Image (spheres, grey):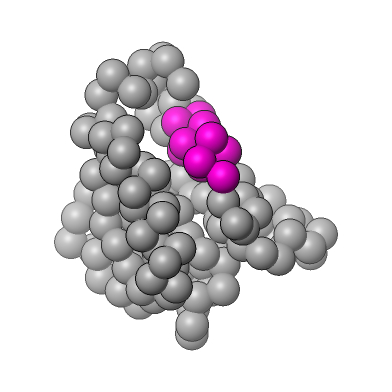
């Protein structure tokens, strides 16, 4: 995680989860190390935020109402082409993993989330996509 922790304020993370408790846990984790957050309760809200604001990473619940996290990521990438995406889900089925891989999702994290796993995955994704050492 070297390099990213020194300048986390440079990165905005879009968090979408329809469960307020889960959304707040994710917000607290990433803001706790200095990242800026954009919070959405749905895929549609996430799309609105992404259209108005610079986003560096999307952290999305897979089971959002109407649009899934994967569908939301695909639509957000129409505005931010190379945006790294991390899905959070209680469903870690092989079919979801294959679908995520085909869609170039950086990682799929299991719920309930663990602090170290979320922060480590976010830092690695940002380092890979933005070249932070």
Find out whether residue 12 is within the magenta segment. no
- Please tell me which residue is depicted at 38% across the width and 71% down the height of the picture: 20
- The magenta stretch is 114-125
Q: Position of residue 17 (x, y in %)?
A: 44, 68
Q: Position of residue 68 (x, y in %)?
A: 53, 73
Q: Is residue 43 above or below residue 126?
A: below
Q: Is residue 106 above or below residue 17?
A: above
Q: Is residue 36 above or below residue 44?
A: above
Q: Position of residue 114 (x, y in %)?
A: 56, 45
Find out whether residue 118 is within the magenta segment. yes
Between 127 and 8, which is closer to the camera in this rendering? 8
79 vs 98, left or right, is left
The C terminus, quarter of image: top left
- Please tell me which residue is depicted at 34% across the width and 52% down the height of the picture: 27
- Please tell me which residue is depicted at 22% across the width and 32% down the height of the picture: 10
Q: Position of residue 35 (x, y in %)?
A: 28, 39
């Amino acid at each position: 995680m070297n390099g990213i922790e020194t300048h986390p304020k440079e990165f905005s993370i879009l968090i979408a989860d329809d469960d307020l408790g889960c959304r707040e846990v994710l917000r607290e984790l990433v803001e706790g190390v200095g990242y800026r957050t954009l919070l959405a309760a749905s895929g549609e809200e996430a799309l609105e935020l992404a259209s108005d604001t610079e986003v560096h990473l999307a952290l999305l619940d897979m089971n959002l109402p109407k649009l899934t996290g994967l569908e939301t990521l695909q639509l957000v990438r129409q505005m931010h082409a190379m945006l790294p995406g991390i899905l959070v889900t209680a469903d870690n089925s092989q079919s979801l993993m294959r679908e995520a891989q085909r869609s170039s999702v950086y990682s799929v994290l299991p719920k309930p989330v663990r602090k170290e796993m979320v922060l480590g995955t976010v830092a690695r994704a940002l380092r890979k996509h933005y070249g932070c050492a």
